[in-house]
């Protein structure tokens, strides 16, 4: 529809100079007022048709361009949602945000300009040349010099602009990253009085973006003056040579007027194409960056024939599991085996960097093991349907995240049909009922993005309550009690033991008091299992565990 409307409106635009020439040569020169009125009326009708088609073309072009932007944003969002932690780390959140917003906007603008300008430009250029030849062939020889000159100028400038626009987009990523870090880490910045340093850091990133943008802008500023120089020189040449042809009787005044109009239409078409070519390099770079995301396959591949039903027992087993990041010299986990059974609490402890959180992330498939097998109720997690997995496993991450909304909307995130009574019960178990009741609105109390309007301990307890509302068969707690005081920690674990009595509980913790009463404690050291047993057994037989315990407790307390 856009192409058809643009074709009609461009043909109407090309027809108008011919009608104008006829009015001059056949009406004004001969004094035929009737011919002038008749042809003038036809010109008005053609102009009306041109306007209607132009409006229709812009309308449909805009709808299509906006739909392209919508679909691209949707496609990037869907692909990012499928990424594992490995792909997220590869691209980085700031770059993904820029690609979903600014990059898509550049492609969207190019699409809009294509439908509104680029479709009509070649039609007008070719049609203008044909109509100019129809008016006067010898004078049309000027086009052999004008059009190639313009093409050469545009090509050279665009060729130089492309790498600059890639630099602009990369520096937008940098500004986005620095700003995001400063907003997120504002408390740390102020605590260490690093405001001046962060201002300099942002200024450096901002100035770098400005410098590259200026270099691109200088090239862009050359485009229009160069084109206008060619346009104006061409107009002077046409009038000069056309005047001599009229003086010699080889051409009429109306034909010269029409020829000038066609020349301007040809050059305007080239200028429109020039404007497009100014946008193409940046949009091309943006399209490549978007395509990088769309072409990246997640390392967590959905099963071809997913298992949708489990035995509902919550039996978890890791068999000789290994995990390593791409390009890393050593794997994070090596030959890790453990079994977590329903009705038992299994704890994992180890020094910083021993792979505890990585081990926990393998169960809900935040990333896949590079070796060995993770089994839930005897089924490899790589064969499980994601919905079935989500129903069976409840994860409370090391950094609890709350979404903007209310307390209730966050608690119902994994189970939208949960009743208010169930929410209060989960809050009671998570030792969060008291402070939620104190908040204005209770369950309807607002929660800011990331849970920034509640304390770290309150965020942890709300995240625990969110997992409890889901009522999964397997609970995964990734150092989820670190922000709690000892008394609250003890009360919460006692309440959890009652609430999760029939479920499988796997706890990763740094605090010995959190895991000392677990049915089984697994000790990790440099990615390997170096001990397994109860607290009492490990204190007597495992030196690594004993060192960890005595770094926090005295001999009497440990006993």
Image (tube, grey):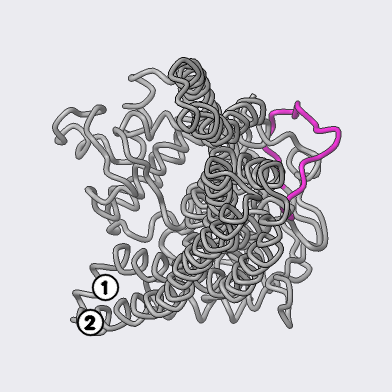
Q: Is disc 2 surrounded by few (<14), some (14 to 19) or many (20+) residues within 10 Å?
A: few
User: In the displayed structure, does residue 33 sit left or right of residue 294?
Assistant: left
Q: Position of residue 497 (x, y in %)?
A: 46, 40
Badge 2 marks a residue whose secondary structure is loop
- Picture layout, residue 218 above or below residue 13: below
Q: Magenta stretch: give its range.
A: 298-316
Q: Give the residue number, with chain letter if any, for mark 2.
A: 194
The verdict on residue 346 being magenta is no
The answer to which of marks 1 and 2 sits earlier in the sequence is: 1
- Picture layout, residue 90 above or below residue 519: below
Q: Position of residue 522 (x, y in %)?
A: 63, 63
Q: Quadrant of residue 540?
A: bottom right
Quadrant location, the N terminus: top right
Q: Residue at (53%, 78%) from the top-left corner?
A: 546
Quadrant location, the C terminus: bottom left
Q: Residue at (47%, 64%) from the top-left corner?
A: 232
User: In the displayed structure, does residue 350 sit left or right of residue 526?
Assistant: left
Q: Position of residue 172 (x, y in %)?
A: 44, 67
Badge 1 marks a residue whose secondary structure is helix
Q: Give the residue number, with chain letter if any, for mark 1.
A: 188
Q: Are marks 1 and 2 in contact (CB under 8 Å)?
A: yes
The answer to which of 352 and 546 lies nearer the viewer is: 352
Q: Residue at (38%, 22%) from the top-left corner?
A: 422
Q: Is disc 1 surrounded by few (<14), some (14 to 19) or many (20+) residues within 10 Å?
A: few
């Amino acid at each position: 529809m856009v192409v058809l409307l643009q074709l009609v409106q461009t043909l109407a635009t090309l027809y108008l100079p011919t009608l104008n020439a006829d009015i001059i040569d056949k009406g004004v020169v001969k004094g035929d007022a009737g011919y002038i009125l008749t042809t003038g009326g036809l010109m008005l009708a053609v102009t009306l048709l041109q306007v209607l088609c132009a409006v229709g073309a812009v309308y449909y072009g805009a709808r299509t361009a906006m739909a392209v932007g919508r679909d691209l944003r949707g496609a990037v969002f869907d692909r990012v949602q499928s990424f594992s932690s490995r792909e997220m780390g590869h691209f980085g959140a700031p770059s993904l945000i820029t690609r979903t917003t600014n990059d898509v906007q550049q492609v969207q603008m190019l699409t809009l300009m294509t439908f509104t300008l680029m479709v009509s430009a070649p039609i007008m250029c070719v049609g203008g040349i044909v109509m100019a030849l129809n008016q006067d062939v010898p004078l049309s020889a000027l086009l052999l010099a004008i059009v190639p000159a313009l093409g050469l100028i545009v090509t050279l400038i665009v060729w130089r602009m492309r790498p600059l626009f890639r630099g602009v987009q990369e520096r937008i990523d940098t500004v986005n990253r620095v700003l995001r870090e400063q907003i997120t880490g504002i408390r740390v910045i102020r605590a260490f009085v690093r405001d001046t340093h962060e201002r300099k850091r942002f200024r450096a990133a901002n100035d770098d973006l400005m410098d590259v943008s200026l270099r691109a802008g200088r090239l862009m500023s050359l485009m229009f003056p160069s084109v206008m120089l060619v346009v104006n020189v061409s107009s002077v040449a046409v009038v000069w040579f056309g005047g001599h042809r009229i003086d010699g009787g080889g051409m009429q005044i109306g034909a010269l007027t029409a020829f000038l109009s066609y020349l301007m239409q040809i050059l305007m078409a080239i200028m429109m194409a020039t404007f497009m070519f100014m946008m193409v390099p940046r949009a091309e770079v943006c399209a490549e960056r978007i395509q990088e995301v769309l072409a990246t396959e997640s390392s967590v591949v959905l099963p071809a024939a997913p298992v949708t039903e489990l035995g509902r027992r919550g039996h978890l087993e890791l068999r000789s599991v290994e995990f390593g990041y791409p390009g890393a010299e050593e794997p994070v986990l090596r030959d890790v085996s453990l079994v977590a059974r329903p009705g038992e609490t299994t704890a994992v402890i180890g020094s910083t960097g021993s792979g505890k959180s990585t081990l926990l992330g393998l169960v809900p498939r935040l990333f896949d093991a590079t070796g060995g097998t993770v089994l839930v109720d005897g089924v490899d997690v790589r064969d499980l349907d994601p919905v079935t997995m989500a129903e069976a496993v409840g994860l409370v991450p090391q950094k609890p995240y709350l979404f903007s909304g209310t307390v209730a909307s966050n608690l119902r995130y994994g189970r939208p049909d949960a009743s208010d009574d169930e929410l209060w019960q989960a809050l009671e178990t998570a030792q969060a009922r008291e402070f939620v009741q104190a908040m204005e609105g209770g369950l309807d109390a607002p929660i800011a993005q990331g849970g920034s309007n509640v304390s770290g301990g309150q965020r942890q307890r709300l995240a625990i309550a969110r997992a409890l509302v889901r009522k999964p068969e397997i609970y995964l707690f990734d150092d989820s009690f670190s922000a709690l005081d000892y008394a609250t920690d003890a009360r919460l674990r006692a309440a959890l033991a009652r609430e999760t009595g029939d479920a499988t509980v796997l706890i990763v913790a740094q605090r010995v008091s959190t895991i000392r009463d677990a049915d089984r404690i697994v000790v990790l050291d440099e990615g390997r299992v170096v001990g397994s047993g109860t607290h009492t057994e490990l204190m007597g037989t495992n030196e690594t565990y004993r060192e960890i315990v005595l770094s926090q407790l005295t001999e009497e307390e440990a006993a």
